[in-house]
Amino acid sequence: MDKGLMGLNDVREPSLYTVKAVFILDNDGNRLLSKYYDPELYPSMKEQKNFENNVFNKTHKADNEIAFLEGMTIVYKSSIDLFFYVVGSPQENELMLMAVLNCLFESLSQMLRKNVEKRTLLDNMDGVFLVVDEIIDGGVILESDPQQVIEKVNYRADDSPLSEQSVAQVLQSAKEQIKWSILK
Amino acid sequence: MIKKFDKKDEESGSGSNPFQHLEKSAVLQEARIFNETPINPRRCLHILTKIIYLLNQGEHFGTTEATEAFFAMTRLFQSNDQTLRRMCYLTIKEMANISEDVIIVTSSLTKDMTGKEDVYRGPAIRALCRITDTTMLQAIERYMKQAIVDKVPSVSSSALVSSLHMVKMSFDVVKRWVNEAQEAASSDNIMVQYHALGLLYHLRKNDRLAVTKMLNKFTKSGLKSPFAYCMMIRIASKLLEETEGGHDSPLFDFIESCLRNKHEMVVYEAASAIVHMPNCTARELAPAVSVLQLFCSSPKAALRYAAVRTLNKVAMKHPSAVTACNLDLENLITDSNRSIATLAITTLLKTGSESSVDRLMKQISSFVSEISDEFKVVVVQAISALCQKYPRKHSVMMNFLSNMLRDDGGFEYKRAIVDCIISIIEENPESKETGLAHLCEFIEDCEHTVLATKILHLLGKEGPRTPTPSKYIRFIFNRVVLESEAVRAAAVSALAKFGAQNDDLLPSVLVLMKRCMMDSDDEVRDRATFYMNVLQQKQKALNAAYIFNGLSVSVPGLEKSLHQYTLEPSEKPFDMKTVPLATAPITEQKTEIAPVATSKLPEKLAPCRQDIYQEQLAAIPEFQALGPLFKSSEPVQLTEAETEYVVRCIKHAFTNHMIFQFDCTNTLNDQLLQRVLVQMEPSEAYEVLNYVPAPSLPYSQPGSCYSLVRLPEDDPTAVSCTFSCTMKYLVRDCDPNTGEPDDDGYDDEYVLEDLEVTVADHIQKVLKPNFGAAWDEIGDDNEKEETFALATVRTLDEAVNNIISFLGMQPCERSDKVPENKNSHVLFLAGVFRGGHDVLVRARLALADGVTMQVTVRSTDENVVDVILASVG
């Protein structure tokens, strides 16, 4: 039932299902992460990757923020060697999609301490999966405030192996060991 | 140890992507570490990440290996590492469909969702609901209810959203949580409020009263979340549309008030809702248009895009409402986002003056190659609309279109161009030859079968009537040599039309046809042989019946009738007249300028309305043996819009009978109606044979009852009749809340408006693409002619429309369009009268003080001619 860009009958259905798909590609258009929330939209992996390729080819040259491709509204953003995309139906409120995209980008930016580039992203891939999971659940916008997302995920990027916390942990384990030795 | 692992990983990775050369089997091997004690959270986390990454890349996991990994993962619940636990939840969700026995983690998840760690609770609920089915859902129902009203927003949101996902599967269970959702909707947290409203709406959307109450409550108290506002605006506009509420309703006021909201998202949603409302007046549009105008100069591309796209939509119906924005739109035509520029230009094309057309077209041709097909289609649509508005510009447009036709582009794009050229040809006879020439050039190298056959069909129709038909033959015959079967077959049909229309071309066409008879494809050969034989007879009537005007039966109907015939073999030959006629003639329908959907799915062939009725009626035992359904009328309202009961009638005509179908809706929620029927008193010699009542009519669920009437046999000219109608039924009062009816009921009746049967109910529209040929084919055996003066009619247009709607016949040869500034016109109408008699009407109209009309009727049956003339008089 999808309709064209200028479809006549495009009254917005009252629904929480806003996001059709979200994906992050590298600067060669390779998929780093992607989630499709509408099982009817590109059910097979091949269709999904075709779509991502098409979207990448049409968007990576000009940073235009918004595009309309294959009957879908797509908002996007790039950072160094990464491209972030949020896909919605042609009737969707473009600003809601932008809210999701901004939240995703801001959350990752905070989590990765402003190093939003491929290497850091991949080094903290577990955190990235968790961030996406906190922002969208099955196509529903779960959270749109980056601060909230970061608090919920509570993830520490691992570029400083010797932080204060680890000192505290060492102390804690030392205490435990002493306790055990006394009990013995 | 951790360090070492990381280093190793780094070395094996390909520099920039540590996951690039992951091997599924190696990762699964590594997953054995999950079973080691003590658990090493850091390493396990890394392996889980790899597994999820592989799944995300589309790596296929077999059931056995997935199950094995899943079971190993369950051990990790023993660790208290937060991130590790969260990744376990993700793994559960990702593997829910590929691993077996995922429900084994139910108790661990239930523990987490009710535990003390708030960070675990929300995600645990979402993972749990992912693996839960209806029966298990009841087991956790208590926890879900508690979670929905939990103080922690992430817990409440997770529970609400998960409940929403479960609605599809277990509506009845989730329905019981309505009170909790109601409580959550008053939450201070903006996301919780949004999710609660969404869930409440999904649970109640079939109960209009409850939705209205909910809207009233929250629009009065105000909302915190902009998302919730957007949701409310959508609900309000849907409700307005369903109730056809006037724009003085409080719902409209609410939407309008949102135009002043502080969030752009809400303002845009409200403006868009107003713009999309049917029957919006210019005054109501104005405030929406002015906020959109402001957005046009926003620094945010998405907002500019949203605004100009919506303005483009307004310009389709109300170009004058957008003129105020012309200056802002002019600034956007050089926008670096080409989508925005395209939308701005096409909007200006709709609102601007004729003088600006050339400039805008030049601007757009400078970047048309840079934009996506979707927007190219928008450009073509704008051109198409423009051609209707400024017919004099057609040569500029045609030129532009032919250039676009030569460029690369997908099917939708090419189809839009072809449709546009065809509509220009039809509107402007002087552009016909250039247009046909462009299309001929296009099919020389066209990969789309549908378009090639469409153009060949058009060439066959229009080509023979041009001054030099012979020049098209080469293009058509090239197709026979070069193309696929479907195109070859279409080319053969087109050739036949040239042979039939132009005597001097006939010998050459016959030679070409002979070649086609040796084609490798059955269909092409069959068509060639058929046309060859018809053409060799050199008889006008045969040409008309078999070459110019094909069958007018409905194809699914023909299929069904033939199947029926083969099931019951009989001596009688198959009778074409028993086949229902096609209701909507597909060809020569005015090519809709309505925008083309860029659907990626193939269009499904919807069964036509009449085929649906035919099946519904055939299923009722009383109505068997009536023969095929001849025609179903449009519904006629027999009640006012806002009454207790809403009744509309559809008139179904059969060979000797009529069935009246009454679609009734009971709008009283404290009544259950039973044994509902509509009693009919005819004014003429019509005989009511049978009533089929609707057994029961609960609140707001439509039901149908039927009346069967026999048409007068002795007087075939008695085609019109008035029926007075009364609805009779048994009322049982019931509880409005539960719908539980009382035991006793009483009989009651309700008077409906009178129902008219007119001549149009007996005639089915049929399109004759070549009216002249059909006229000659029927001959003047039963011809009659009469002249009438239409004193009340002031214009030719009005006269033409009156005659068409009165007789219910199909206008042919585009004769329903009266050229401007003419004071005479000829209207050609074609139809089939009940019983299968072809009938053609030629009406010559002359405008003096009133309109004088000379009607000539031809038919295969004499009575039909009399019926038509009698009813016109």
Image: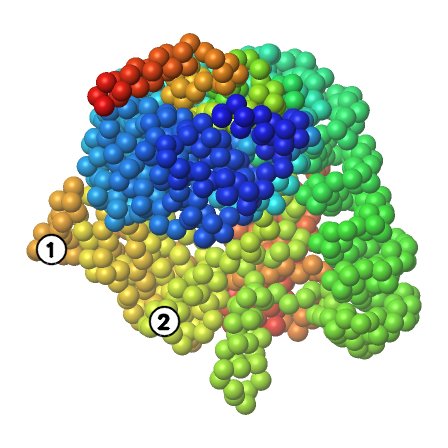
Say what secondary structure mark 2 lies in.
Answer: helix
Asked if B204 appears above or below B6 in the picture, the reply is: below
Asked whether B196 or B160 is in front, the reply is B160
Say what secondary structure mark 1 lies in.
Answer: strand
Q: Residue at x 58, y 51 (%)?
A: B603
Q: Residues within 10 Å of mark 1 (few under 14, many from 20)?
A: few
Q: Quadrant of residue B77?
A: top left
Q: Is B742 on the left-hand or right-hand side of B494? A: left
Q: Which tag, 2 or 1, sits closer to the chain's start?
A: 2
Q: Is B694 on the left-hand or right-hand side of A77? A: left
Q: Position of residue B345 (x, y in %)?
A: 69, 23
Asked whether B271 or A130 is in front, the reply is A130
Q: Chain of mark 1?
A: B
Q: Residue at x 52, y 23 (%)?
A: B3
Q: Position of residue B829 (x, y in %)?
A: 62, 57
Q: Quadrant of residue B597?
A: top right
Can you identify the residue that label 1 sits on?
Answer: B746
Q: Quadrant of residue B729?
A: bottom left
Q: Is B14 on the left-hand or right-hand side of B357? A: left
What is the CA distance from the residue labelled 2 to the residue labelled 1?
29 Å
Asked if A118 appears above or below A160 in the picture, the reply is: below
Q: Residue furthest top?
A: A164
Q: Residue at x 47, y 40 (%)?
A: B31
* Residue type, label 2: Phe
Q: Position of residue B27 (x, y in %)?
A: 53, 40
Asked if B585 appears above or below B512 in the picture, the reply is: above
Can you identify the residue that label 2 sits on?
Answer: B623
Asked whether B766 or A135 is in front, the reply is A135
Mark 2 and mark 1 in contact? Answer it, CB < 8 Å.
no
Q: Residue at x 31, y 57 (%)?
A: B704
